[in-house]
Image: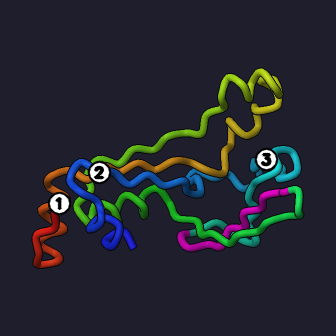
Amino acid sequence: MCQAIITQLKPGGRLVALTINPHLVPDRLPRVEHYHSGVTLPGPLYDGAPVEVTMLTASGPLQIRDYYWSQATYESVLRQVGIESIMWHAMQVSAAGFETFGRAYWEAYLAHPHSIVLEAPRDAAAAGCAELLLGEDRP
């Protein structure tokens, strides 16, 4: 999948993905009911382990099956396709969120978030790597 994504990025473009936090602490996950979204783990945590994402909506719960991958796995796969600069960004609460709910409300989520943002810019070296792998010159 990373190879397919990287070939679509122009040099200077970047992959930005909201993904399951590779540093999940299963017994410290915030309750789904508290934030109206969250994850549950049906079993032990390992690369490829299923993760149930639940969002509580006005029309009822929405459940999505996702999969856990370690930071080492994400970074290894991205490096295999020529991405060298990989950044992880913690979720942040807006000023309005703090104002509306207070800091104490967000403490559990900020300490143990279930989601994280992965950013991986495509540089010129990655573009050359993709062209070699594809055998073509992409604009």
Mark 1, Cα crowd under 10 Å, few <14 / some 14-19 / many 20+, is many
Query: Is label 2 in a helix, a strand or a loop?
Result: loop
Q: How is the image coloured?
A: rainbow
Going from the N terminus, do you reach mark 1 or mark 3 first? 3
**Tag shown at residue 56:** none
Reading the chain from its start, which is encountered first: label 1 or label 2?
Answer: 2
Boundaries of the magenta span: 47-57
The residue to which callout 1 is attached is 127
Q: Residues within 10 Å of mark 3 (few under 14, many from 20)?
A: many
Callout 1: helix, strand or loop?
helix
Q: Front-most of 42 and 127?
A: 127
The dot on residue 13 is: 2
The secondary structure that dominates the magenta segment is strand
Neighbour class for label 2 at 10 Å: few (<14), some, many (≥20)?
A: some
Residue type, numbered disc 3: Pro
**Residue nearest the viewer, comparing 55 with 59:** 59
Q: Which residue is mark 3?
A: 30
Which residue does the image show at 41% across and 48% down from the upper left? 119
Question: What is the quadrant of the C terminus in the image?
Answer: bottom left
Residue at screen point 39% across, 73% down: 1
Q: In the rendered structure, are the residues bearing label 1 and label 2 in contact, judged by CB atoms less than 8 Å apart?
A: no
User: Mark 1 and mark 2: span between their CA atoms?
Assistant: 10 Å
**Labels 3 and 2 touching (C-beta < 8 A):** no
Vertical relation: 84 (above or below) 104: below
Q: Does 19 lie within the magenta span?
A: no
